[in-house]
Image (cartoon, grey):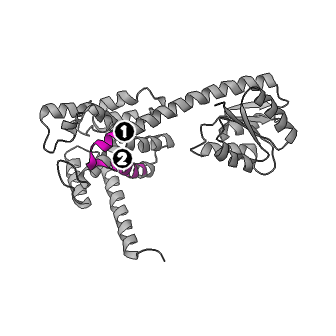
Amino acid sequence: MSERILIVDDEAAARTALATLLRRQGYQVRDAASGEEAIAECTAFRPDLILLDIVMPGLSGFEVCRQIKATPETRLTPIVLITGLSQTGDRIEGINAGADDFLSKPLDFNELLARTRSLLRLKHYTDELENAEAVLVSLAASIEARDPYTRGHCERLAAMSVPLGEALGLDDDQIKALRLAGTVHDIGKVVVPDAILLKPGPLSPEEFRVMQKHSAAGERICAPLRTFEYVLPIIRYHHEKHNGSGYPDGLCGEEIPLTARILQLADVYDALTTDRVYRKAVSSEAALELMEHEAGRGWWDRELFGTFRDMVVASHRSSELAVARGPAK
């Protein structure tokens, strides 16, 4: 299927000229006469590239660009701002809005086609990376499904680790990494046989050594994806311990990335409070008490655990209050 291009300009003649040129090149083209219409077309048409005029009635091109780049479904769509404005400040505003390129009026059609082809190639590569990411997420889900006792584990980890990361002021890339790592952190268990993964009793030393390989294996599986840059340390290091007794590298204290320490606490807490093949779940209070004891032994970051514990307790109190109030009338 040919690539889809959305032209946004309040001047009908400009839209018609661009659409005619691009259709002759084999592209699918739609146009929008306003910023509001452009945002609606992004959902309906799902363009691979947007040619966006800056000066329009209603929403300006800058504002349209900001909204499109702030929406997860369209944030990677390339946007070319078309403008007659020549001031440096206007270009800076466009860059801050998330624009990928600029074209100045009057347009040179050869330059337009060259930049269009270049940005569409980049979009194609981006789509391939997103597809590869989707494959890894599906693989992680299938690994989780091998063990019926861990159903919902990934979603619960994201639900606990993301708020903790936000409370600690982590940036958007790290928050996204925590959310994604909640799903793929154990993807390396694909190398662990079911006889070990689902064993109801304690693992032998040899079996435990096999289990320990999963974190490094998970990092290797995900390493080819550059979009996993912030996720890889979480995958590799979420079984390290604060005193250096963890695996795979025996890191200590601050050597363990903060995001890995965050996911680690959520992982341990969820493992304790859900039924597993090798033991029954314990209460939230018992789990936090045990983790407090383990933090005292040097397993976990004590200060971070204190923040995590407070968050869990506050969440439980909020849920209890909601139940006590009953359904809203």
Towards the viewer: 40 or 229: 40
Towards the viewer: 295 or 94: 94
What segment carries the magenta color?
142-162
Q: Nearer the viewer, mark 1 or mark 2?
A: 1
**Residue 104 x/y as whole percent:** 80, 30
155 with respect to 14 (left or right): left
155 is within the stretch colored magenta: yes
* Residue ranking furthest to the bottom: 329
316 with respect to 200 (left or right): right
66 is within the stretch colored magenta: no
Answer with the quarter of the image where residue 283 lies: bottom left
Where residue 140 is drawn, which disc sits there?
A: 1
Q: Tell me what residue is drawn at x 80 percent, y 41 percent.
A: 9
- Amino acid found under the numbered disc labelled 1: Ala
Q: Looking at the image, do the residues carrying marks 1 and 2 touch, with CB atoms under 8 Å apart?
A: yes
Q: Report helix, strand or loop for mark 1.
A: helix
- Amino acid found under the numbered disc labelled 2: Cys
Q: Tell me what residue is drawn at x 20 percent, y 53 percent.
A: 290
185 with respect to 83 (left or right): left
**Residue 188 x/y as whole percent:** 31, 33
Where residue 174 is drawn, which disc sits there?
A: none
**Residue 118 x/y as whole percent:** 66, 24
Q: Tell me what residue is drawn at x 38 percent, y 49 percent.
A: 155
Of pointers 1 and 2, the one earlier in the residue sequence? 1
Q: On the image, numbered disc 2 is attached to which residue?
A: 154
* Residue ranking furthest to the right: 13
Cα–Cα gap, marks 1 and 2 = 9 Å
**Residue 110 x/y as whole percent:** 79, 22
Answer with the quarter of the image where residue 301 lies: top left
Task: Tell me, yes or no, if residue 145 can be seen here.
Answer: yes
Task: Tell me, yes or no, if residue 67 can be seen here.
Answer: no
Q: Report helix, strand or loop for mark 2.
A: helix
